[in-house]
Image (cartoon, helix red, strand yellow):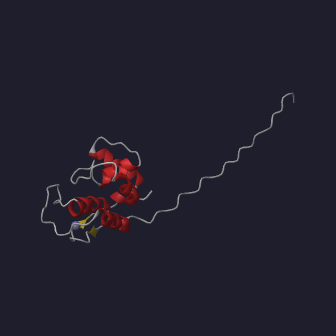
Amino acid sequence: MKLSEEIALGRHLVTPRGGNVFNCAIGMANLAVGERAFTASEHYTKLKQRHPWIMKIQQGSCILCRKEFAAPVELLYHLFDVHVMGMYDGGVMNPGCPQIISFEDFLDRVAAFEPIEQPEPELPVIEVLFEEKVAGH
Ligand SMILES: [Zn+2]
């Protein structure tokens, strides 16, 4: 499943809150696939296991405020905390944030930077031949 799809599912499982990995986009994505994490670092580890690209060093900037990032994960929580929840980076409310976007806009922006999903590799067909055993033979 794509990260944006996980977040879309997980948003119904927690109360969205910024500055808090359990209730932000990362927590939502993990909950959506049934992952349980008890620390922030467990959350990041589980996210990375499913979406290794999220931690890859890759320079980029936020399309809304031009803040620069070194990895997609930084952009992910920045978009959520700052532009959905209306906080400053770091989790303090920013009542004057002029660039608030809706949750749907946020999902579209995540979808725009996540890799195009590779089709699932087809499982090899394992042929199991049963020898018919007939009683008496
Ligand atoms: Zn921004």
Q: In the displayed image of the protein, which residue is found farthest to the right?
A: 137
| Residue lying at 18% horizontally and 59% vertically, measured from the top left | 89
Percent position (x, y) of residue 118?
49, 62
Q: Nearer the viewer, residue 110 or 121?
A: 110
Q: Nearer the viewer, residue 32 or 126?
A: 32
| Residue lying at 40% horizontally and 58% vertically, measured from the top left | 5
| Residue lying at 30% horizontally and 55% vertically, measured from the top left | 25
Percent position (x, y) of residue 109?
33, 67
Percent position (x, y) of residue 68?
23, 67
Above or below, 62 relative to 123: below
Q: Quadrant of the N terminus?
A: bottom left
Task: Give the mark count.
Answer: 0
Q: In the displayed image of the protein, which residue is found farthest to the front?
A: 12
Q: Nearer the viewer, residue 33 or 50?
A: 33
Above or below, 119 relative to 66: above
| Residue lying at 21% horizontally and 53% vertically, measured from the top left | 19
Q: Quadrant of the C terminus?
A: top right
Task: Write down the quadrant of residue 6 in the picture.
Answer: bottom left
Image side of residue 98 versus residue 132, left or right: left
Q: Nearer the viewer, residue 17 or 124?
A: 17
Q: Quadrant of ligand 1?
A: bottom left
Task: Write down the quadrant of residue 129 in the picture.
Answer: top right
Above or below, 63 relative to 79: below
Percent position (x, y) of residue 47?
36, 51
Above or below, 58 relative to 91: below
Task: Write down the quadrant of residue 97 in the picture.
Answer: bottom left
